[in-house]
Image (spheres, rainbow, N blue to C red):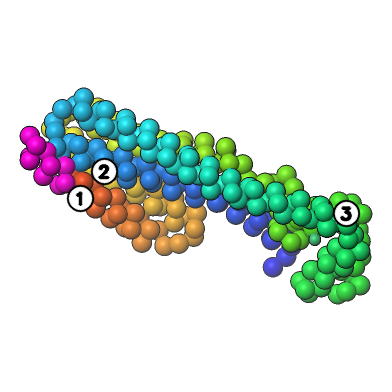
Amino acid sequence: MTEQNNENQAVSSDVLNKLRASVLGANDGIVSVSSMLMGVAGATDNTGAIFTAGLAALVAGALSMAVGEYVSVSSQSDAEKAYIEREKNLLQKHPKQQLEELVQAYVDKGIHEKTARQVANELTKNDALHAHLMTEFGMGEDEVVQPMHAALSSFFSFSVGGLIPFITIITVPHSFRIIATGCAVLVALTLTGYMSASVGGASKRRAILRVVAGGLAAMIVTYYVGSLFGAKVG
Ligand SMILES: [Zn+2]
């Protein structure tokens, strides 16, 4: 594989990771909000109750996804910042040793020592820190992950997914509520299953089946739990 290809792959894998996270977030929104709605709709015909429960599921789910993402990406960002500080220190204290480390890294990649030394020398002269970070961790000093961005994007993708069953169940006439929401969820999950399979390069049919079966099972279970519970208290 050529170096050009490697670089393209690194760039696109970052974009793919973000896309995959968005699709997963939307998927979570679809499944958890639709299940909550089905549970309540199984217990009551009251549109106000369904609306309130759906809105609460939407807001609570989106916030919990955002907080979870913030916490997890924060610890990743702390680790990345620590790597950068460590490399900065090492470069200041042991520049010779660090140059040798870089030479060795290129030799390990299969480059002849003479060439490796020349490359390492030139890169060190240009921007030693950047050369070390790219070689050792595959990241630039300006590429530290952003917890707030990750949190906002989770919040957004969960909300987009959750709005699909929510809007469906509160807008369609009362007697079509369950079937229409089920259909909307089926279509939405087919789409997220297709997208996540495209992103990962996996079998589309299997990914769609998995995602749709999981989502339908969640809706059916909560609907029956809701109707049992609703029948008992009502
Ligand atoms: Zn280093």
Question: CA gap, disc 3 to disc 1?
Answer: 61 Å
* x 7%, y 34%: residue: 234
Determine crowd level at label 2: few under 14, some 14-19, many 20+ residues with C-alpha closer than 10 A: many
Q: Where residue 146 sits: x, y (%)?
A: 61, 41
The kind of residue tagged 1 is Val
- Quadrant of the image for the N terminus? bottom right
Can residue 187 be seen?
A: no
Q: Where residue 69 sits: x, y (%)?
A: 50, 44
Q: Is residue 104 left or right of residue 220?
A: right
Question: CA gap, disc 2 to disc 3?
Answer: 56 Å
Marks 1 and 2: CB-CB under 8 Å? yes
Marked residue nearer the N-terminal end (2 or 3): 2
Q: What is the span of residues highlighted in magenta in the rendered image? A: 224-234
Q: Quadrant of ligand 1?
A: bottom right
Determine which residue is flagged by label 2.
Answer: 35
Corner quadrant of residue 112: bottom right
Q: Is residue 87 left or right of residue 122?
A: left
Determine which residue is flagged by label 1.
Answer: 221
* x 47%, y 55%: residue: 198
Q: Nearer the viewer, residue 157 or 141?
A: 141
Determine which residue is flagged by label 3.
Answer: 92
